[in-house]
Image: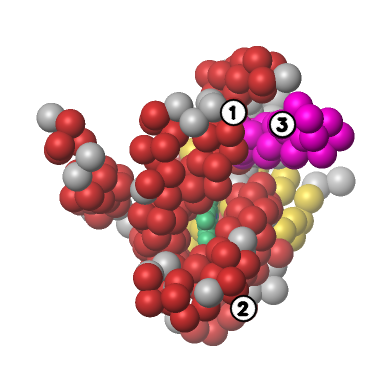
Amino acid sequence: MRKIIMSALAAATIAAPAMATGKVTCDVPESEWQPREALEAQLTAEGWTVRKSKVDGGCYEVYAKDEEGRKIEAYFDPATFEKLYVAQRGKVLFEKK
Amino acid sequence: MKAIVNHRIFFWTLLALPAVAAILSGKDAADQLHGTGEWSARLLILALAISPLVLVARRARWTLWLQQRRRYIGVAAFAYAALHTFYYVMDMETLPAILSEITIISIWTGWLAIIAMLLMALTSNDASMRWLRAGWKKLQRLAYPAAILTLAHWLLIHDGVTAALIHFAPLALLEAYRIAHHLNRRKTPAHA
Ligand code: HEM
């Protein structure tokens, strides 16, 4: 028992699988992507305040304050800018069906 | 060398290093949440892991060394949680903004966790220990609900559950060992 626990402990500590972080993934050829700055500009025009954005799981992920002032995390299709997923502190506000 | 390593100030410095690095980094409040939250959780997990570690490692010297410093580790866990909350408040800016998201489960689990840790931190001194007597030990058991609330907070707020699970797995295993150990002992008292 003691040995099992000790080795499981060691394994759990060493093995840090680099899993994909996001809840959403996109599969769009990179040649079709529009620039991320264009998405930021579009969202800003719609009333969001963008804090930062990055690529996650092949989608564009945006951290922002929405038009209602909520701190949100949102995913977009990098080619069409279609909104895929929006969450506030882990609470899902929008999810594309 | 040994005298330095065993000195209180050495240990306090060690505990303060991540905070110093975070503050000096000059990152935005929103970007400080990640590091401060993780350090708080790590220290809380370490504080809780010490007793079962002493048991598993059969009172190895290093586990006893840690055990003597458990109270400092617990207080540091609270200090990092306080820093984390400070950055959260700085980032949210206004009370209405803070209140507007307090009903979200990932957020209220955080608030409950820090309230539990605050109660423990406030009573982590000799005077409270004398004053509360037997109640003191009971109060310090708030560390368990605090840890479970922290796990929930982390799982719900962070993108992906891997980091939270990796941090909590060792503690879960150690607790499983401790429970199995106690059950075994009860079954075969002669073996104890
Ligand atoms: C006072 C109430 C609390 C509030 C309002 C709060 C708020 C937050 C927020 C907003 C995040 C997300 C950070 C991000 O977006 O990167 C976060 C993450 C986190 N918090 Fe808290 N927190 C609280 C208490 C605590 C406590 C007491 C602990 C630990 C004991 C803790 C540990 C963590 C951890 C581990 C993370 C994940 C870090 C990450 O990877 O983003 N929090 N918290």
User: Counting other residues with Cα less than 10 Å from the Cα at mark 2, is it few (<14), some (14-19), or many (20 or more)?
Assistant: few
Which chain letter goes with mark 2?
A: B
Q: Quadrant of residue A82?
A: top right
The secondary structure type at the circle numbered 1 is helix
| Residue B189, image x, y percentages | 80, 34
Residue at 45% in and 27% down: B60
Residue B26 in the image: above or below residue B139: above
- Magenta stretch? B165-192
Residue labelled with disc 2:
B100
Identity, as a three-letter code, of the amino acid under mark 3: Ala
Identity, as a three-letter code, of the amino acid under mark 1: Val
Q: Name the dominant secondary structure of the magenta segment.
A: helix
Residue B51 in the image: above or below residue B84: above
Q: Earlier in the sequence, mark 1 or mark 2?
A: 1
Identity, as a three-letter code, of the amino acid under mark 2: Ser
| Residue B114, image x, y percentages | 53, 67
| Residue A85, image x, y percentages | 71, 48
Residue at 78% in and 50% down: A95
**Residue B124 in view here:** yes
Numbered badge on residue B192: 3
Whole-number angstrom distance, CA of label 2 to CA of label 3: 54 Å
Whole-number angstrom distance, CA of label 1 to CA of label 2: 45 Å
Residue at 53% in and 26% down: B57
